[in-house]
Image (cartoon, rainbow, N blue to C red):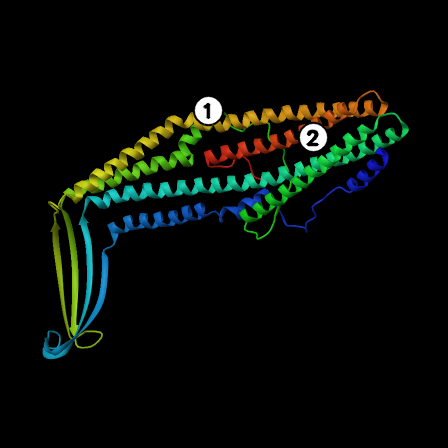
Amino acid sequence: MILPLLAALQVAATATPVLIHDSIPTLTLAEALERGAGLDPNYVAALGHVGEAEWGRRNAVLAFVAPALDVFNDWTYYSTEFFNVGTGENQRNLVTGQLNLRYEIFALSKFTELGRSRAALDASEASEVKQRYLAALVVEQVFYQVLADKALASVAAERVHRADEQLAVARARVQSGAVVHSDSLQLLLELTRAQVDLLRSQAQLRVSQLELGRRTGASDAVDAAPLGEPVPDSLPITLDQAVTEALETGPDWRLARAQASAAEHYLKGLKGEYLPKLDLSFTAYRFDDHFFPSARSVSAIDLVVRWNIWDLGRRELAIAQAKTTRDVTRAVSLDLARAARHDVALAYESFTTARAALDLTTQGLVVAQENFRVQEERYRAGAATILLLLDAQVGLTQAQADQVQAVFVARLAWAGLEAILGRRLSSPA
């Protein structure tokens, strides 16, 4: 009864289940990063803010060298005739042309706006770098996930292959009477479990490839090309160098300093509203009864002193709010400076630990491979039980999966430190 059952079950489990997909495009890491950077909404917004800040900087500079200019024409029709100052006659049509030039000779806000716009531009550029590397980190994470899932699918396929070979050996030994029928049943169960895990691994790979396609602008799945270089043994900079670099040029710290500086200049500009302002303006008028007016021209030059003595407390309220903003941004900047060593060390040590774990999993894989080889030979020779063989099989599969995950974690830790520093520690493959 047992042998026919085993034969039938083995026929059902002979074909290894494989999810077959059409060929899909493959991208290198560099290509994925290039395509993915411009698709992240936060990065697109940050890039747009840089352009806005650049125009703010230009406006602050132009306020010192160029006057404001307005030109317009106005046509008025009266229900009864009206004296037209252009033609000197009573008419119903009056066309007025006007040109206004105004230059602010003195205002403290012009000087503070220079500093504020410079700081705002620096903050926007720092934010752009930060969002670019955060977007790259997401793309890298998905890219590495595809590579990890491919490796795990290969591990699952190897497990199926080994289980299939072991089942054939066990059936032969059962038929020869060397072992009991339960050995074949145990291996058949292992084969079934391996096939189920393979299906799951292939499905997960397909999902991660679809996510990579989304992150790189494709409408379908995209595969990740193998990386040309292994995980580096160590980082190219020391922890102290990384902390110093983060404080000087790291996007988070640079952004915090720039925001504090912009808030300080804005507060100074509001306080400058207590001082008088001096404007020089030139206005030219033309009057006629048709476009463009040319019958009569009048011009005027004005020198105006403006002094806002009291505006019902609105200025004082704005200053109080600006002080709060200045104090908050300053506190954030100082707090980030104090936390620099902690934050950088966390990312730095994450890679160091992950790299050490990778070395250990590599050693563990060698041990698991040798243990499986020994137990397989012992089982074939009748010196080991099926449980020892299955335990070695499970240990080998787990060791392979552990190594794949260790590579994935180490590469992500490296990318995380790059995001903190705002620069590449190596060229992407």
Does residue 294 lie above or below 354 as drawn? Answer: below
Residue at point 17%, 65% (across, down): 284
> Label 2 is placed on what type of residue?
Thr
> Label 1 is placed on what type of residue?
Asp
Could you tell me which quadrant the C terminus lies in? top right
Q: Is residue 353 left or right of residue 338?
A: right
- Comparing 383 with 56, the one in front is 383
The image quadrant of residue 195 is: top right
Expressed as whole percent of the image width and height from the top left, the position of residue 357 reads: 60, 25
Label 1 and label 2: CA atoms lie apart by 40 Å
At label 2, counting other C-alpha atoms closer than 10 Å, the crowd grade (few under 14, some 14-19, many 20 or more) is: some
Does residue 238 lie above or below 329 as drawn? Answer: above
Expressed as whole percent of the image width and height from the top left, the position of residue 317 reads: 19, 41
Could you tell me which quadrant the N terminus lies in? top right
Does residue 376 lie above or below 284 as drawn? Answer: above
- Comparing 219 with 293, the one in front is 219
Q: Residue furthest front?
A: 1
Residue placed under numbered mark 2 in the picture: 397
Residue at point 29%, 51% (across, down): 59
**Contact between labelled residues 2 and 1, with CB atoms less than 8 Å apart:** no
Label 2: which secondary element: helix
Tag of residue 240: 1
Residue at point 36%, 35% (across, down): 256
The image quadrant of residue 211 is: top right
